[in-house]
Amino acid sequence: MKETVEDRALASTTLAVELSGVTIAYRDHVVLDRIDLEIGQGEIVAVVGASGSGKSSLLRCLAGFLNPTAGTVRIGGEVVATAETSLPPERRRIGFVFQQFALWPHMTVRENVAYPWRTRGVSTAERASRADELLAQVGLAGFEERSPTTLSGGQQQRVALARGLAGDPSILLLDEPLSSVDAARRDELQTLIVDIARQRNLTTLVTTHDQREAMTLADRVVVLDAGSIAQFATPLELHERPANAFVARFMGALNVFAVTVIDYIDGVLICEVDGDQGRIAARVTECSSGTDVVLVARPESVSVVPAGLGDQDGVVERAVLVDGRSEVRVSVGGIVVRAFEPGLPQRSIGDSVGLILEGIVLPREDGAHR
Amino acid sequence: MTTFRLIPSTRRHRAVTLALAGCAGLSALLVSGAAASTKSPAKGDTSLSGSITVYAALTTQGGQGFANAFELAYPNVHVTMVTGGSGALGTQLAAQEQSGHVQADVVLLADPTDMDSVENNGILSSWKPSLKGRQIPLGYTGKDWVGAFTFEMVLLEHQGMANPPQTWTDLESPALHGQVAFGSASYSGTTFGWAAELHTIYGWKYFQTLKANGVRVEQSTTTVGTDVASGKEEVGVTLDSVARSLLAQGAAVNVVWPTGGAVPCPATIGITKDTANAAAAKAFETWMVSRPGQIVAAQQGYDAAYFGAKPTDPMPKHAKQLNVNWSRITANQSSILSGFAGIFG
Amino acid sequence: MTRLGSHPERLKIGVLVAVVLALVGYPLVDLLRYALSGPGGLDGALRTVDTHQVGIALLHTLVVSALASVVATAIGVTMALLVARSDLPFRRFFGVVWLAPLVIPAYVSGIAWLDAYFRAGLTDEVAHVSAGWLSGPGGVVLLLALQGAPLAYLLVFAALRSERIGALEDAARSSGRGPAGTILDVTLPLIRAAIAGAMLLVFVSSASDFGIPAILAIPAGFSTVTTLIYSDLSFAGGAHAIASAGALSALLGLVAMLLLFATNWVGSSSGSAGGATQSAASSRPLLALGRWRTPVAGVCALVVVFTTLLPLVGLFLTSVSPNFQIVLQPGRWVASAYTAALSGENIDALGRSALLAGTAGIVVAIGGALVAIVVHRSRRVAGAAATLLSLPFALPGSVVAIAFLVAWQRWLYGTLLIIFLAYVARFAVVGVRTSAGTLGALSEDLVRAARASGATPRRAFVDVVWPSLAPGMVTSFTIVFLLALHELTMSSLLYGPQTKTFAVEVLAAEDAGDAALTAALAIVVTAITMIVLVGVLLARPSRRVLASAAGIEVPEWKV
């Protein structure tokens, strides 16, 4: 599936979504800062970031609930918003799925789903049959006459999804669609969203604060940091080549150190961790960013070896079972390095071990610390 | 605004008929009697026409009785009666005066103090009917008004009580502890006149004794009447007209005309300076103090102020009246009121 | 733009301001001008106020209202805990029956209690037991408290239904706390905003009530601010009387407004506790009464019998007994009072009152919703205007009526329109508050969802916002209909020869000393109220209406 992504992006002559220089600024703070974004037809894009990073604002700006204070928003090649003019949401042909479902309590499930067709003047019988079809697709056949308030969270979100698909939108926007749903139902719903989007070749934007969710469902991921795009890339690129420490950390690189390079010989970097914590050695393929850099090592790229056999020695502080593998924390003269090892934890607290870190070096940026 | 007048005024006719047929009350029957008696001597004066509005501090039936009788005497004049409490009517009139358009042509209130307030608000015309040839009781004329008929403050007792009081000072008897009620001088003008008069005769000491004797101060003379009728109280001070209305409804009460004398209180009548139909308004007031008007008043259970209005005057022959100086009482209204309030709260 | 729509709002705000000025601003300013126009102006007006007397009356009002609010809130909290947290048998039944005092006009319950318990009343006839103290401060406090208790009950009950509180109570139970301890440590602190709100509301409505003090306090020589206003106006109020009544009501209004604002503040700090969440009905009750279930239910039933049933029985007996004395044998009952109550002027007046109450209810419900929407969209100007709309509710009815007389009677004398306008002005706050509460709780996402589905702002409003407002509007209509049907003070000053209201006829019957007719009219108005309420409850899911009824500010049932 992944290999077709580039093809798909290239194949489409017009972009499904295009943002250029989109800024949303209030008097005292900037919500989105000069966002440039190009999304191809049928792409599934996840927008991730911490709360307050601007994910929801980005979606709302696309939907027309928020207007840019600068920049241009295009959907299907058509300009829908600039700082001066804005097409109202109802004329953008979008589907929107809200975090808290936003189902209308005074309407039945069928009436909720049929509503987008109702606004477009589709006859009662026609829209009812289309709504029932959609409900069957999301696995809610038989719930048509129910009041949405009587459904579970997962069921309500399926209804909301069906409503988002109704009216044949050109793009589907989902704002944290899984965060109000039981963990047990999340996977099913995620699969359902991806299947439906693929089946319809529907351009889809999903916001989430969960990087794993983003990695599993998206073709490409937008990482937002305080209103700016930190990186926009496929999950693989994010994993292999994070643009900066923020992205690296967000993508699960637990060992991120701001360091000063002391030496770099034969692919081994020796450096001093900021704050006089001590020295650490790591194997990196290149180091050309100067002396003040950020060292990133994913835990699965850290090898724990018998003492004396690694690039450095340390003491085991903790070893626990996480997601079917053991996470080992090793203190190297006070610097804590995390490593993943397959299988059950073998090591005891206080064991002396050797460590080999394989990582990458990134240039320092403001805010790359911590 | 006309859309809100959805209840057509034609229903009034049925309303009155039903009231006559169904409502309890001697007064309603008396009204038809009055109508009959005024009809026979004359065909009525047709020189006046138009309509007048009378604001009257009377019961609905009482007010309508006067209106019907007057319309018989002046067939081309239509009388609209607006009945209600003296206070509410006075407040309405004052507010109307303020907004520049008084709706009433004739004002008929239950006592001189209320009428003086209306007079002071500049609502009344200075025109008064001639009372020549009539014996005018003390205080029955104000600057802009005259007395219309008389209420008498009397004693009312629940039937079957052991030692019914015969006069005002009997109320001080310990035997009547907690069994006596009268109205509040702060709400009822007639009660105010009664309290002022007894204060002149007996001093505040009298009321202090009554207070110590557990007297209850009701809101109005009617409340006092119904409470005595129901047995909530054994003895009450109320109006003779209230007593008569209760008796007509079959209440188990006796009227006692105090040996010291009942306290008379004039109902007061005047015409407004803004009246659009001065001729008819003057005719109404003149008719009220004339012999036919006094007879109608007596038939409705009020005491005639003039002519004695025999043979229908409801006041018994032996009954005595105190001679009340209303001018002096109204002049001292605020000090008397605060004296009363000082004792009864 | 992100709010409910993008229409130019200026025109709507302009209309709102104009309406508020016509209904509130102009009449009250005109009244003020009038009050100061008497000899001596402000000085003269103030000199007419007997400061000593006012001081006593104000003290009485404050003490009586404070006691009533404490007692009412205690009763209301107990009732709410029993209904929402215990396994009391028939608790749903009690939950509805306990609201009965709300639907009985204050003046009716005053008369009814005297008919039941006072000398020569029902209990005196049957068992020679009577409560002479009822006519006095004690009776005033008791009746005001009973009148206010359902109000407190509704507010507290709504707060108790929040799911959050249930979970926190469970947490306390699992931490080893007993039921009583849990209520003390968790429940009561969590609903303290609702409790404080209830106390303030009962206080305000008690302080401005006239019906109960009129019947129970005046005979005992116990003055309150409202009875003092009444006595001022009783002496054919001229400019001075109105000025001093105005000064007194300004005093009362000031206290009321301060407390109303305090209530708003408390209400807003409590967050959206009114969220309609379904409580887990199957879960174990916090207050398991065990072997006390039957005795407690018995006590509850007795409370209903003594506070609601017996007074109404007393009232009924008075209405069917001939010759003013209560008769217990049905064979000697007479129906003449009902014949009179349901015929002639009385039935006409009943029709007028129903028409007035119905139109005022509809206009306030719909208008209130519109005002709430305009306020919701543009807070400043509209918000100030809407705040002014709550002023007539906090002032005594007589003052509002005089203001309308002074301002509007030269054009509207003797029409139902002037009474109608006064009702709308006085009760507008009910409609505005109810709808504002709904809008505040309405998620903007529901509107956005409609917009995303292709609905224009107008369409989204019609399809989503309006239906959400509907249940609250039914509540507003019901409350205003009942308030207006019971309304006495204003119509007794505003009626003309052809526009007597039913309550004015009740007053006239009382003035005429016809106790049976008065009682019969009171029974009729109570019965109609009951029928309307039952109709509304049957027409909609009852709990929702009752719960949303708790969302409005002050349903004070004063005359």
Image (cartoon, coloured by chain):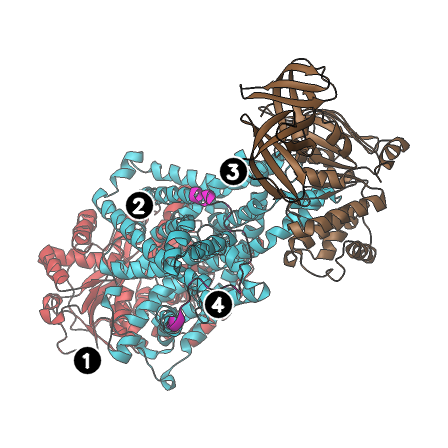
Chain colours: A brown, B red, C cyan
Of the numbered discs 4 and 3, the one sitting upstream in the chain is 4
Helix, strand or loop for disc 3: helix
Q: Is residue B223 above or below residue B124?
A: below
From the image, tell me which residue sits under label 2: C241
Foreground: disc 3 or disc 2? 3
Mark 4 residue type: Arg
* Residue holding disc 3: C383
Q: Quick one: SS at disc 1?
A: loop
Q: Is residue C363 left or right of residue B231?
A: right
User: Label 1: which residue?
Assistant: B160
Magenta stretch?
C264-292
Are both tags, 3 and 2, on one chain?
Answer: yes
* Chain where mark 3 sits: C
Does residue A36 sit above or below B47 in this rendering?
A: above
Q: Within 10 angstroms of label 2, few (less than 14), some, or many (20 or more) residues?
A: many
- Characterize the local packing of mark 4: few (<14), some (14-19) or many (20 or more) Cα atoms within 10 angstroms: some
Residue type at mark 1 is Gly
Q: Residue furthest bottom?
A: C331
Residue type at numbered disc 2: Ala
Label ID, residue C92 = 4
